[in-house]
Image (cartoon, rainbow, N blue to C red):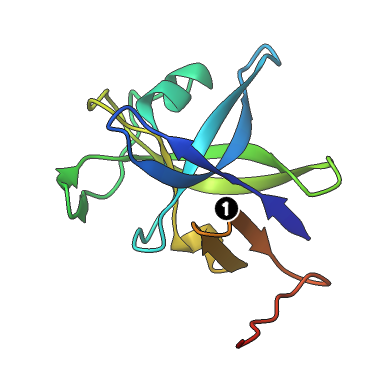
Amino acid sequence: MRFNGKWLACDDEVSRPVIDGALFDPDGNVLTFPFLIDTGADSTLLSFEAVAFIDADLEDATGPLLKGVGGSTDSVRLDARFWFLNSIGEPIPLGGSLLGRPYPSGDEMCILGRDLLGNFAIIVDRPGNVVSLIQGKHHYVIHES
């Protein structure tokens, strides 16, 4: 299986590796969110905008305090699924028990962390303009020239 991503030019003029994931709200509407490939993040984290879109019930939701280079943030544990399109255009569901941001926190995007990335070989090649997650019958070879 292979998921192809892209380099997204962000507001701060830095390009970051992302894969677009689709979320569904309770009425079946779909919205696509970029998921930052963050090999340093322990957990996948849905942005506040994504949490609001899926209309998650946050009243009694709790989650761990997440810490990283940018500081710390609260989170809530959610049961949510999102879909990535594989390399032949089929939607593949991922997710389950995920973390989400319970309130807005400036410039943010969904983060794809090691809890899900650990299932894939990750190719993040800026000079070659490649962002890809692969597993199963797909593999990669590194040639020395």
The residue at the far bottom in this view is 144
Q: Is residue 59 left or right of residue 116?
A: left
Q: Hey, which residue is sitting farthest left in the picture?
A: 71
> Quadrant of the rendered structure where residue 43 is?
bottom left
Seen from the viewer's position, the closer of residues 27 and 2 is: 2
Quarter-wise, where is residue 106 in the image? Answer: top left
The percent coordinates of residue 61 (x first, y second) are 35, 34
Q: Could you tell me which secondary element the residue under label 1 belongs to?
A: loop
Judged left or right of residue 22, residue 124 is left
User: Where's the C terminus, which quadrant?
Assistant: bottom right
The N terminus appears in which quarter of the rendering? bottom right
The residue positioned 20% from the left and 41% from the top of the image is: 73
Q: Position of residue 35 (x, y in %)?
A: 50, 41
Q: Is residue 4 above or below residue 1?
A: above
Image vertical order of residue 59 relative to residue 3, above or below: above
Residue 41 drawn at (x, y percent): 35, 58
- 128 and 134: which is toward the camera: 128
Front position in the image: 66 or 20: 20
Number of on-image labels: 1
The one nearer the camera, 134 or 41, is 134
Image point (28%, 28%), residue name: 107
Q: Is residue 51 left or right of residue 30?
A: left
Q: Residue at x 65, y 48 (%)?
A: 94
Q: Residue at x 60, y 88 (%)?
A: 144
Query: What is the x, y in percent for residue 55?
Result: 49, 18
Mark 1 = which residue? 129
- Mark 1 Cα shell of 10 Å, populated few (<14), some (14-19), many (≥20): few
Disc 1 residue type? Asn
Question: Residue 80 appears in which quarter of the rendering?
Answer: top right
